[in-house]
């Protein structure tokens, strides 16, 4: 079951982010800072009270584009639960939330950043409709090159759910 994360879930999200993103930098420090920012939402996948994965999405205004953007900041699944479809369910949930609020906020796509060495992740995102829009989008704290990917949203007439951008 996917549910909206609460502040009580933030330490668990930061701990799992530290584990799954250890090669990219200190997500134990980064994640708590992201989770308290306006416009940042998080969800958990949970089964029988056991948290298995998370997704963190940020809505913000890109001043260069002069529009609101939706940026998948992080998605992670605990090692014991990987390869069971949890990540895909979380990704699909995030895309559906963005699609629902997009018309009211002028959002045209979902964006994300992935390490250039994370070929498995790049292929996984590509299967969900993401494509590379910037092959050199800066670097992670450890020096790995970041790749920006985006997934265009299909036009929708869905009304905004309760978790609209702040």
Image (cartoon, rainbow, N blue to C red):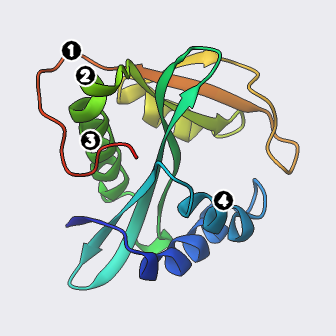
Foreground disc of the pair 3, 4:
3
Q: Is residue 75 above or below residue 16?
A: above
Classify 10 Å Cα crowding around label 2: few (below 14), some (14-19), many (20 and above): some
Quarter of the rendering containing residue 51: bottom left
Q: State the CA–CA distance, disc 4 to disc 2.
A: 33 Å
- Label 4 Cα neighbours within 10 Å, binned few <14 / some 14-19 / many ≥20: some
Q: CA distance from mark 1 to mark 2?
A: 8 Å
Residue situated furthest right in the rendering: 143
Q: Are the two marked residues, 1 and 2, in contact with CB atoms closer than 8 angstroms?
A: yes
Q: Which residue is mark 3?
A: 97
Q: Which mark is residue 56?
A: none
Residue at which label 4 appears: 21
Compared to 98, does 62 lie above or below? above
Identify the element where label 3 is drawn: helix
Q: Quadrant of residue 80?
A: bottom left
Circle 1 sits in a helix, a strand or a loop, which is it? Answer: loop
How many angstroms separate mark 3 from mark 2 (CA)?
11 Å
Q: Of the numbered discs in the image, which one, if any, rests on residue 103? A: 2
Q: Nearer the viewer, mark 4 or mark 1?
A: 1
How far across and down, in percent of the image, does residue 91 sit? 35, 45
Q: Is tag 3's residue or tag 2's residue first in the polypeptide sequence? A: 3
* 61 w.r.t. 22: above or below: above
Measured Cα–Cα span from mark 3 to mark 4? 24 Å
Give the x, y percent position of residue 24: 75, 53
> Which residue is tagged 1?
155
């Amino acid at each position: 079951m996917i549910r909206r994360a609460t502040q009580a879930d933030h330490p668990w999200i930061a701990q799992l982010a530290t584990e799954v993103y250890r090669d990219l930098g200190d997500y134990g420090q980064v994640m708590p800072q992201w989770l308290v920012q306006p416009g940042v939402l998080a969800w958990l996948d949970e089964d029988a009270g056991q948290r298995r994965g998370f997704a963190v999405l940020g809505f913000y205004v890109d001043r260069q584009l002069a529009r609101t953007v939706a940026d998948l900041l992080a998605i992670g699944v605990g090692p014991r639960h990987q390869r069971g479809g949890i990540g895909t369910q979380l990704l699909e949930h995030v895309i559906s939330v963005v699609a629902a609020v997009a018309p009211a906020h002028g959002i045209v796509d979902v964006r994300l950043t992935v390490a250039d060495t994370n070929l498995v992740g790049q292929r996984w995102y590509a299967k969900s409709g993401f494509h590379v829009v910037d092959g050199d989008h800066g670097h992670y704290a450890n020096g790995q090159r970041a790749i920006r990917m985006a997934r265009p949203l299909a036009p929708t007439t869905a009304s905004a759910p309760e978790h609209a951008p702040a």
